């Protein structure tokens, strides 16, 4: 995997770790669509965008959460 494409929050992310259930999507698919896809994936992730804004983000916030 190209680490340059991986979200900078992945290491601490409960979604990336598979601890947060997301619309019954398999983990590998979530990672491919959002986390390991470079900026064009991250920018579609609500969790990523809230973190970028410096907000506090609960563990149950995931890519499809309302922003
Ligand atoms: S893209 Fe979203 S779900 Fe994936 S690691 Fe980053 S913050 Fe977590």
Image (cartoon, rainbow, N blue to C red):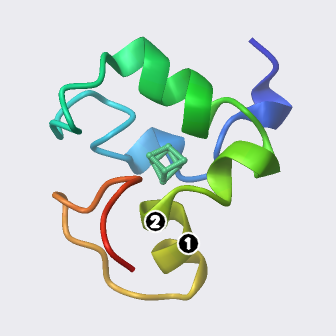
Q: Position of residue 53 (x, y in %)?
A: 56, 87
- Asked if ligand 1 lies within 8 A of label 2, the reply is yes
Circle 1 Cα neighbour tier, 10 Å, few/some/many (<14 / 14–19 / ≥20): some
Q: Position of residue 29 (x, y in %)?
A: 46, 18
- Along the horizontal axis of the image, is 6 left or right of 18? right
- Along the horizontal axis of the image, is 31 left or right of 20? right
Q: Which mark is residue 49?
A: 1
* Residue 46, placed above or below residue 20: below
* Residue 5, placed above or below residue 10: above
- Asked if ligand 1 lies within 8 A of label 1, the reply is no
**Label 2: which residue?**
46
Q: Which mark is residue 37?
A: none
Q: Position of residue 30 (x, y in %)?
A: 44, 28
* Residue 55, placed above or below residue 8: below
Circle 2 Cα neighbour tier, 10 Å, few/some/many (<14 / 14–19 / ≥20): some
Q: Nearer the viewer, residue 49 or 4?
A: 49
Where residue 62 sits, quadrant-wise, is: bottom left
* Image point (49%, 74%), residue name: 51
Where residue 3 sits, quadrant-wise, is: top right
Question: How many marks are shown on the rendered structure?
Answer: 2
Q: Position of residue 13 (x, y in %)?
A: 37, 47
* Image point (44%, 13%), residue name: 28
- Along the horizontal axis of the image, is 19 left or right of 47? left
Q: Nearer the viewer, residue 62 or 13?
A: 62
* Image point (69%, 35%), residue name: 6
* Residue 35, placed above or below residue 28: below
């Amino acid at each position: 995997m190209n680490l340059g494409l991986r979200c900078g929050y992945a290491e601490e992310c409960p979604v990336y770790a598979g601890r947060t259930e997301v619309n019954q999507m398999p983990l590998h698919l979530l990672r491919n669509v959002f986390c390991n896809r470079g900026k064009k994936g991250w920018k579609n992730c609500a969790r990523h965008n809230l973190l970028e804004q410096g907000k506090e983000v609960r563990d149950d916030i995931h890519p499809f959460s309302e922003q």
